[in-house]
């Protein structure tokens, strides 16, 4: 066996994989957006803590998903949180989109002092109407 045969023997599987991966990626990229039929209902849980630059636009991107059916549950610990007016404006601008705002109160239970975001998510769970959850 010549060195060229060895190189070909070792490199051929890699090249075959590369070609197959390129074909699969092309098929995936060429798919159109799903029409939402046959998809499972999803609850997106989005914990909030304070306002930040571009918060409205960032949260609006959750509400304008091309996936159906879905709901977005925004959770703030208290009504005076800076993100609350932004979420209320978003809900007002997009009525009927399945957007909800929950107040979860201070961190408590097993996550007290460990991770406030996880404590917030834990208290948001009862507000979810769907079995499939997406944590954002």
Image (spheres, rainbow, N blue to C red):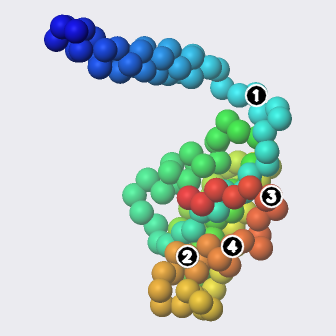
Tell me how far mark 4 sits from mark 2, CA to CA. 10 Å
Left or right? Give the position of 32 relative to 95: left
Q: Earlier in the sequence, mark 1 or mark 2?
A: 1
Please tell me whether residue 69 is drawn above or below residue 126 in the rendered image. Answer: above
Where does label 2 land, which residue? 118
**Observer-nearest of 29 and 54:** 29
Residue 72 image point, x, y percent = 69, 56
Residue 25 image point, x, y percent = 50, 21
Where does label 1 land, which residue? 35
Tag 3 and tag 2, C-beta contact below 8 Å: no
Tell me how far mark 4 sits from mark 1, CA to CA. 29 Å
Please tell me whether residue 23 is drawn above or below residue 94 in the rendered image. Answer: above
Where does label 4 land, which residue? 124
**Observer-nearest of 49 and 82:** 49
Q: Earlier in the sequence, mark 4 or mark 1?
A: 1
Label 3: state its secondary structure.
Answer: loop
Residue 88 in view of the camera: no
Residue at (23%, 14%) from the top-left corner?
7
Where does label 3 land, which residue? 130
Q: Earlier in the sequence, mark 4 or mark 2?
A: 2
Check the image and name the residue furthest to the front: 1
Dot 1 crowding, Cα within 10 Å, few <14, some 14–19, many 20+: few
Tell me how far mark 3 sits from mark 2, CA to CA. 19 Å
Residue at (64%, 20%) from the top-left corner?
32
Residue 26 image point, x, y percent = 51, 16
Residue at (77%, 33%) from the top-left corner?
36
Please tell me whether residue 129 is drawn above or below residue 8 in the rendered image. Answer: below
């Amino acid at each position: 066996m010549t060195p060229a045969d060895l190189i070909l023997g070792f490199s051929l599987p890699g090249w075959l994989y590369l070609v197959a991966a390129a074909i699969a990626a092309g098929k995936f990229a060429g798919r159109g957006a799903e029409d939402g039929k046959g998809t499972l209902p999803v609850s997106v849980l989005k914990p909030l803590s304070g306002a930040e630059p571009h918060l409205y636009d960032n949260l609006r991107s959750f509400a304008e998903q091309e996936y159906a059916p879905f709901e977005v549950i925004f959770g703030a610990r208290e009504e005076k949180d800076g993100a609350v007016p932004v979420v209320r404006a978003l809900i007002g601008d997009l009525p009927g989109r399945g957007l909800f705002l929950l107040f979860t109160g201070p961190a408590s239970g097993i996550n007290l002092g460990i991770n406030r975001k996880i404590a917030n998510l834990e208290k948001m769970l009862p507000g979810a109407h769907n079995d499939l959850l997406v944590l954002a």
